[in-house]
Amino acid sequence: MPSVEVSVLGSNAIAGPPLQIWGWEIGTYLFAGGLVAGLLVITGFAHRRGRGPMPASLAWWGPALAPVLLTAGMLALFLDLEHRWHAFRFYTTLRLTAPMSWGAWILLLVYPASVLFALGAWREFGPPLSLPGWLAAVSAWAERRRVPLAGINIGLGVALGLYTGLLLSAFGARPLWNSALLGPLFLISGLSTGAAALALLESSEPDRERLSALDLKLIGAEAATLALLLVGLTTGGAAQRAASQLFLGGSFTALFWVAVVLAGLAMPALLELLHRLGRAQDTVYAQVLVLLGGFALRMVFLLAGQASRWGTMQ
């Protein structure tokens, strides 16, 4: 019997279904990274301005929360690694063409910068805290350099927020991710979730309303960026148009429109507008929905992107 050679091209959805390699761990890491970026940028600007007394959420709560959330995100990333004890190899070189290499170095810079910013902000504005001698000395050093550290954290926060989207958009093999708008989208979403988290932490109603007003503007910017991304997909090549159908009638349609657009964007904006018009009470629902929507945005794009591919279904 003559031999038969079979080539598997991966274009048949039954013989070669799309592979789901990244799960909740990467989604959690992307969400935590975006939230930390938002906290660092917003609180960093507040510390740089330095005009009058700052609310507790901006003065020390936000800076203190950032390294804690970053640790949680890095733990989720560590759980996703196949060869966890080889992670140090990311820091043996810097590959300019590798997004993951850039991300590893950005995290290496963000972590100590955010910790120093948190120590300096807490020492100046937070409640008294008993620290060991060496840590108290580091905290005093950071307090004297709090404003420059705030500026450094703004830059690193922007880099971190953009990276969480660029990490996906650099994978050209997935047409849903192949958009230059994914980085700005994730950055704006991170700023929105950061503002929502700060509003939840704030006890002063006037300051909470100012943070909510900022978040309302960011929700509008996020919705506009998301709309532009969808327009780019629907007017792109055959692969991009096929990828957009995942949100426009495909398997991720309900999750995208309900969890991301309705619950994560439209409802928080509506609640905030009604409150500003005096037709609704001030509640935490809008901020909670923004946070849940930010997580849903990353999970939907993460999972749907892995389901998209070049070529047509057969």
Image (cartoon, rainbow, N blue to C red):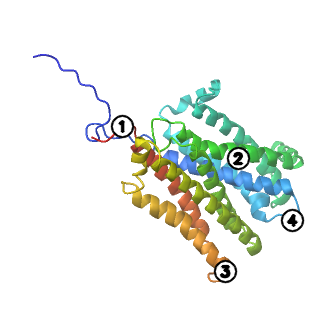
Instruction: Give the number of the mark in front: 4 or 1.
Output: 1
Q: Are marks 1 and 3 in contact (CB under 8 Å)?
A: no
Residue 61 placement: quadrant: bottom right
Q: Earlier in the sequence, mark 2 or mark 1?
A: 2
Residue closest to the far left? 1
* Three-letter amino acid code at the position of disc 2: Gly
Residue closest to the far front? 235
Q: Are marks 4 and 3 in contact (CB under 8 Å)?
A: no
The secondary element bearing badge 2 is classed as helix
In-image side of 187 versus 58 (left or right): left
According to the image, label 1 marks what residue?
311
Instruction: Give the number of the mark in front: 2 or 3.
Output: 3
The secondary element bearing badge 4 is classed as loop
Identify the residue at image location x=64%, y=24%.
93
According to the image, label 4 marks what residue?
53
For residue 277, the mark is 3
* Three-letter amino acid code at the position of disc 3: Leu
Q: Earlier in the sequence, mark 2 or mark 3?
A: 2
Instruction: Locate residue 308, reporting x and y percent.
Output: 40, 43
Identify the residue at image location x=68%, y=53%.
38
Instruction: Give the number of the mark in front: 2 or 1.
Output: 1
